[in-house]
Image (cartoon, rainbow, N blue to C red):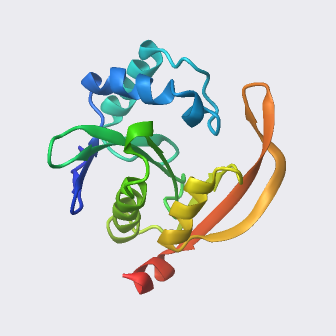
Amino acid sequence: MAFSPLTTGRLTLRAMVPGDAADLAERRSDPATARYQAWVVPYPVESAQALIDAMVERGDVTPGEWFLLAVERTKDGRIVGDVGIRLSEDSHTAEIGYTLHPWARGHYFSTEATGAVCDYVVNVLGVHRIEATTDPGNLPSVRVLDRLGFIHEGTKRESYWVGDRITDDAMYGLLAREWKQRQ
């Protein structure tokens, strides 16, 4: 089965394809973006290609695996970022993550795209709970989660390694019924 694209007022979220590797590598090579992630800079195109190839082989969201969606501006098809979905092995929980190109920040693309993914995982996949984690210092990410109704459920101290640096990991959760009530 292949992932069917999601659309919003300004965006199309689609499964990544091999031609997206250079864009993904560019986004992940941004030092400001990588500061809060577990990948190293520069992020090689070959690594991006291998990641995309694995997702193309799966074709759709698969329990236990991350699946990245390219987020395109509908008006011109330009990729602004990506949203990742990781469905738990029992399919009751979905973890989400999002990354934008530096030039695309400040336009609420993360909120819009992640909201579409929340709709998808709740209404199509039928998850009970959505989770996200972020560095507590990543205030733009925290604001996205707040806007979408996620609840800060705690912070694991010094639990997330980014290269040779350790950081705290703020945990957020949103229940399906809470998402539906907001809609």
**Number of numbered labels in the structure image:** 0
Q: Which residue appears farthest toward the left when viewing the image?
A: 75
Instruction: Judge whether 178 appears above or below 28 on screen.
Output: below
Q: Position of residue 12 (x, y in %)?
A: 23, 50
The one of 128 and 145 positioned closer to us in this rendering: 145
Picture quarter with the N terminus: top left
* Quadrant in which residue 70 is drawn: top left
Q: Position of residue 179 (x, y in %)?
A: 45, 77
* Quadrant in which residue 156 is drawn: bottom right
Residue drawn at x 52%, y 74% as measured from the top left: 149
Residue drawn at x 23%, y 43% as measured from the top left: 2
Q: Position of residue 170 (x, y in %)?
A: 71, 57
Picture quarter with the C terminus: bottom left
Residue 93 seen in the current view? no
Q: Position of residue 59 (x, y in %)?
A: 30, 38
Asked if residue 111 lies left or right of residue 171, the reply is left
Residue drawn at x 21%, y 51% as measured from the top left: 4
The one of 18 and 167 positioned closer to us in this rendering: 167
Residue 176 seen in the current view? yes
Instruction: Judge whether 167 appears above or below 22 on screen.
Output: below
Residue drawn at x 62%, y 36% as measured from the top left: 37
Q: Which residue appears farthest toward the bottom when viewing the image?
A: 181
Instruction: Judge whether 168 appears above or below 151 on screen.
Output: above
Instruction: Judge whether 33 appears above or below 64 on screen.
Output: above
Q: Which residue appears farthest toward the right when viewing the image?
A: 157
